[in-house]
């Protein structure tokens, strides 16, 4: 099959960018941000990594359609729509919540996905909970014909393989590798690619650290630590302290953070630094997993709640 523009065909490496704060100078700790958010305009961050080998596999199987699942603000939905558009593949997004069908024009993520040609299929929350059942998937195949299925959040073995490529040989010099955690696929790839002398710290964006079960499926290495101390009450929950932190961070370092994942991780890293968690003279690599497309949607929700906006 021919593809229009296969930007997954080569291995790519993002830039490492150093930042400096007084707290870091005091303990002689350095923080370097791995700018995965700059990999591609729309297929950015860990979603680029997670899609790479899945899309390659779909093309190898001669499948011309990708089908996946997500919520109304999903970075994954936006990335799949954009990757499909650029590579000449059809895309179907199965979206949680029938009521959202009427709100597409006002929703930045879904209107973006639609503009990239994604067919949006809305289902009830109850149906959505069956999205991994074989019968349910069979029903989707009867409705839509053949497709390559990418799970919600994109985590599977091929996604983890792609996430291993976030790290290059030079990154093995860092003492700590920090990453935001959702389903756990990204951290699984990082742990798998890390050196045994490195500690991988995962900042869960949702309550709980159940993602260790996912990590264990993909690697036997144990050099990681998961915390949900910086989830701000749960997935997509944020407060004015986090918004202030994100806006200050952008002002000080010129690096935008998203409110769901990377903002919470950086807040956590700065807090652990203040607490003296990191060894003196250690070097920290923080992975900026992208997610910036979600800021527009979050700002709409913030405006409704009369909270301050996240500056882009
Ligand atoms: C999806 C996403 C994550 C979570 O990745 P998992 O592999 O599900 O743990 C982290 N950061 C950003 C910006 C994301 O979009």
Image: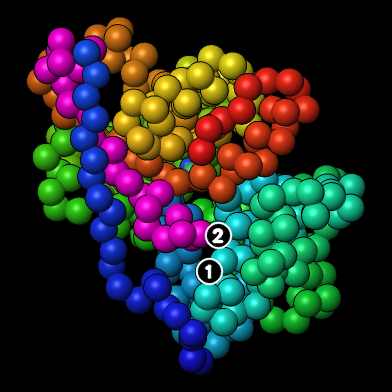
Task: Quickly name the residue at label 1.
Answer: 83
- Label 2: how many Cα within 10 Å (few below 14, some 14–19, many 20+): many
The structure residue drawn at horizontal position 32% and vertical position 31%, both measured from the top left corner, is: 253
The structure residue drawn at horizontal position 73% and vertical position 20%, both measured from the top left corner, is: 306
**231 lies above or below 189:** above
Q: Give the magenta part as a residue range.
A: 23-44
For disc 2, does the CB lie below 8 Å from ligand 1? yes
For disc 1, does the CB lie below 8 Å from ligand 1? no
The structure residue drawn at horizontal position 56% and vertical position 48%, both measured from the top left corner, is: 293
| Circles 2 and 1: CB atoms closer than 8 Å | yes
Q: Position of residue 287 (x, y in %)?
A: 34, 40
Q: Is residue 234 left or right of residue 11?
A: right
Q: Which of the pair 226/273 is nearer the observer?
A: 273
Q: Position of residue 65 (x, y in %)?
A: 64, 78
The way the protein has been coloured in the rendering is: rainbow
Q: Is residue 104 left or right of residue 5?
A: right
Which disc number belongs to residue 79?
2
Q: CA distance from mark 2 to mark 1?
A: 6 Å
**222 lies above or below 214:** above
Q: Position of residue 133 (x, y in %)?
A: 74, 58
**233 lies above or below 223:** above
**In this view of the protein, can residue 278 be seen by the observer?**
no
Q: Position of residue 150 (x, y in %)?
A: 59, 63
Dot 2: element = helix
The structure residue drawn at horizontal position 58% and vertical position 39%, both measured from the top left corner, is: 295
């Amino acid at each position: 099959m021919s593809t229009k523009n296969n930007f997954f065909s080569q291995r790519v490496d993002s830039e490492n960018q150093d930042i400096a704060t007084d707290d870091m100078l005091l303990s002689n700790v350095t923080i370097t941000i791995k700018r995965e958010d700059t990999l591609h305009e729309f297929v950015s961050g860990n979603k680029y990594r997670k899609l790479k080998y899945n899309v390659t596999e779909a093309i190898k199987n001669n499948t011309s359609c990708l089908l996946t699942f997500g919520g109304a603000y999903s970075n994954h939905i936006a990335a799949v729509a954009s990757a499909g558009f650029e590579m000449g593949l059809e895309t179907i997004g199965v979206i949680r919540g029938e009521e959202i069908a009427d709100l597409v024009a006002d929703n930045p993520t879904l209107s973006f996905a639609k503009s990239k040609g994604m067919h949006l299929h809305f289902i009830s929350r109850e149906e959505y909970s069956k999205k991994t059942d074989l019968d349910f998937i069979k029903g989707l195949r009867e409705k839509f014909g053949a497709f390559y299925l990418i799970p919600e959040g994109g985590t599977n073995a091929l996604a983890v393989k792609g996430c291993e490529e976030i790290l290059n040989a030079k990154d093995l010099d860092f003492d700590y590798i920090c990453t935001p955690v959702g389903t756990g696929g990204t951290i699984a790839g990082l742990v798998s690619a890390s050196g045994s002398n490195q500690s991988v710290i995962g900042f869960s964006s949702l309550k709980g650290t159940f993602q260790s079960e996912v990590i264990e499926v993909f690697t036997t290495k144990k050099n990681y630590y998961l915390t949900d101390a910086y989830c701000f009450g749960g997935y997509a929950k944020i407060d004015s302290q986090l918004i202030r932190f994100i806006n200050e961070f952008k002002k000080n370092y010129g690096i935008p953070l998203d409110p769901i994942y990377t903002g919470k991780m950086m807040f956590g890293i700065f807090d652990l630094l203040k607490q003296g968690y990191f060894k003196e003279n250690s070097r920290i690599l923080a992975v900026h997993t992208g997610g910036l497309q979600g800021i527009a949607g979050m700002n709409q929700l913030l405006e409704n709640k009369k909270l301050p906006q996240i500056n882009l």
